[in-house]
Image (tube, rainbow, N blue to C red):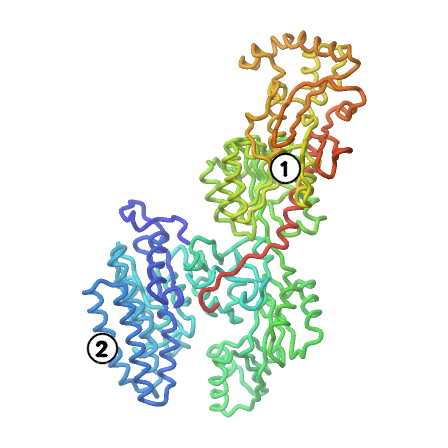
Amino acid sequence: MNQANSSLLNINNAVQLPVNVHKFGGSSLANAECLLRVIQILKQEAQLDDVVVVSANGKTTDKLFAIINCQQSEQRQLLLTELQNQQQNLVCELLSTSAAATECQQIAKDITKLAETDFDDIYQRHDLLAHGEIWSMRLLSALINEQLCPCIGVDSRQVLHLDCDNDYQLVEHSSQQAFLTAKQAEKLTVITGYIATDSKNRTQTLGRNGSDYSATIVAKLIGAESVTLWTDVDGIYSADPRIISTARKLHRIENSVAAELGRLGNPVLHAKTLTPLQCQQIQLNVASSFLPEDNGTEIGVFGDIAKSELSVTHNNDLVKINTNKVSELYLRHVIARFEPIYQCPDKSCLVVSQQFSQLAIEYLQQHQLEFSYQQVSLVAVVGYQVASRSEIKARFKRVLRHEALDALVGSDNGHSLLAFLNESCNVELLNQVHSSITKNARNIGLVVAGLGNIGSKFLDMLPKQLTRISSLENVHLVGLATSKKALINNDGIDPSQALPSFADGSVDYDNQQLLGWLEQHPYDELVVVDITPSESFAQLYQSFFERGIHVISANKCAGSCEQSQYSQLLDVQKDTGSQWLVNTTVGAGLPVNYAINDLLQSGDNIHEIAGIFSGTLSWLFANFSGEQAFSDLVLNALEQGFTEPDPRDDLSGLDVQRKLLILARLAGFELELDNIEVENLVPPSLQRIDKNEFFTRITELDEYFANKLNEAKSQQQHLRYVARFAIDNNNLTAKVGLEILPADHAFVNLTACDNIFLLVSDWYQENPLIIRGPGAGRDVTAGGLHSDLVNLCQRLEHKKKEVVIKGIY
């Protein structure tokens, strides 16, 4: 699509933007609703000087073929009248009264002329078929002039010239000159697809779906930046989605692989579509006019991730022609004219599509060549250099071992494995091949935000995880970000070189730029791992969810925001099917979130959540015996890296307060941060002063904590900083603060830095469920994030996205 996203409403932009070509297929132009949708697409995606290539509206070409094939003149006239009414009704529904009257008169003249056609003359038949595109071009250009911007309509027979003495190849120089002469600056150009004229001034057609070919020809002639084929599906799939329910969209396809798909008869790609783009830096996109907001399929030059894609295609309309006495000259003519799918190495056979088979047979008969022929079908695996991938070839052979194979070969270009069958390829076989070959693989893009201690450790663990965990097989690191810089590479970032790559290639960004990059991601799924403490980054979560992006979060800000905002986040997440995993927001890698979720999913009800949730405060009070002042202990913890750079961030209790809020919400309760009473361990006199001044006055903490410790010792008990949430007869209490606990209490007997979580529920009352272990540290937190990533990828393995097909795929 037009990456500049320039609206036609802003036509006075002084910057000259690249020219793009937009092609609309018949289903995208089928009725008034579709045509008005096209106007909106052009408004959003096109600019003046772009070119729009059109097919015939709806099933018009099929109706014209029916008229040609009709043997009875009266029935033919009825079909012509029906076609005239259909075209005139569409015009009257869309255009202003005067414009509609003019066009209806022209349609009537066209129909009168068609009634006089000599249907035995191949070139007059071509003239008749051309009218579908002509009517479509005239209507859309008139509609654009009335509703959008200045526009001209061009009959491609006036500008696209074919050499009938050279296998009807495009005469590029004269075509380019004619087109540039016809095109007018500062106007959108609408041109017919499918048709051209030969050197004898006769109408020629480019074959069914030939409008795609027309679009790429035009793109080459004008040096366009991109071509977008707007169709009735939102891209090219790993198989025909009407037949294979597990078919998945191929977001990016390497040029040569797309050309092979077209050559083998993929219904979205015309066999010659990519030919004009060879050696050209022109991006080809396939998108749905019915879902223009969805990213389609890009075809171009990509890296290893795109090259790893595999697809399965089939064709039951093939003919194998066997002959042993064809000279090199005749063979070259046959290959040039009839485009065989396959040619035997010894040149004794050709496989051609049904549409060329009769012509090829007539050619051989005309030259008195001996031959035989038979019906065959094809099932093929297509992918970059797939013919040399032994494991794929082995899988393909295995699934076909019981089939009546005529041949199993690799294509000359290496991009397909071809199995020719003596019987039709049925739906069951196609499903078996697709399942075996693709393994229902989903490419998952991974973006890591936050490259500090935990982020660095997460990345350090990533290469080994990707190789040893099967559910991570198709996970690709594609983005890295800090608060100010980002590196996004859709071709993938080497995980083992992540930080050096970031240092070398990252650029400044803002949140809107980041959303723009991520919105255009070419993956089945995108996962953002948020290892930042940033509130502003957490505010992007709703935008992520709206775009179907999944989030794994160690960031507590989103989970502890205002209840109304939190509820809205959950609603958006649920509506879009996005996943939000937050195990490391509380307890680092400890599975407290999983335990709460499992209890609720199983029908239990939680009544109380309590524990020691801060590794820092756990360490401080486990080691606070009175042998050294509390302030010295804090400085010792700071030196060992147990506290935040400003220890008041830990001593304030805010972190524990947020964690308790997150757990209470996960347990199904609605409350605000302010509903949780918190004891700030920093006296008011030290709370708002500069950090450096705080360190000079830190001994002011000592008297208070010495007194609290003596109070505990007098009772032969211990100080601990505890979080408690409880619900009793709908009365909710929530508090975070210092408590004096007996020596045998579970919260007292902890290893320094450990966290402990106590859950009381319907099922765990007399003997509460307790989870304890290290609740902080970069290793366990990074491990918890990897646990969430594996969990998420396992969920996504079973996710299916409905394919919306508005016309014929």
Vertical arrangement, residue 792 with respect to residue 806, above or below: above
Percent x, y for residue 599? 69, 41
Q: Amino acid at mark 2?
A: Lys
Quadrant of the image occupied by residue 752: top right
Cα distance, mark 1 to mark 2?
A: 74 Å
What residue appears at the point 26 percent right and 56 percent down from the top-left corner?
Answer: 147
- Numbered badge on residue 667: 1
Percent x, y for residue 163? 36, 75
What residue appears at the point 50 percent right and 68 percent down from the top-left corner?
Answer: 262
Vertical arrangement, residue 591 with respect to residue 221, above or below: above
- Numbered badge on residue 109: 2
What residue appears at the point 57 percent right and 77 percent down from the top-left corner?
Answer: 343
Q: Is residue 273 left or right of residue 710?
A: left
Quadrant of the image occupied by residue 441: bottom right
Q: Is residue 171 left or right of residue 598?
A: left
Tag 2 secondary structure: helix
Pointer 2: residues within 10 angstroms few (<14), some, or many (20+)? few
**Considering the image in quadrants, where does the N terminus appear?**
bottom left
Vertical arrangement, residue 633 with respect to residue 531, above or below: above
Work out which residue is located at the far front of the displayed protein and give it: 729
Is residue 498 shown to the viewer in this render? Answer: yes
Work out which residue is located at the far bottom of the displayed protein and give it: 368
Vertical arrangement, residue 524 with respect to residue 571, above or below: below
Percent x, y for residue 18? 36, 52
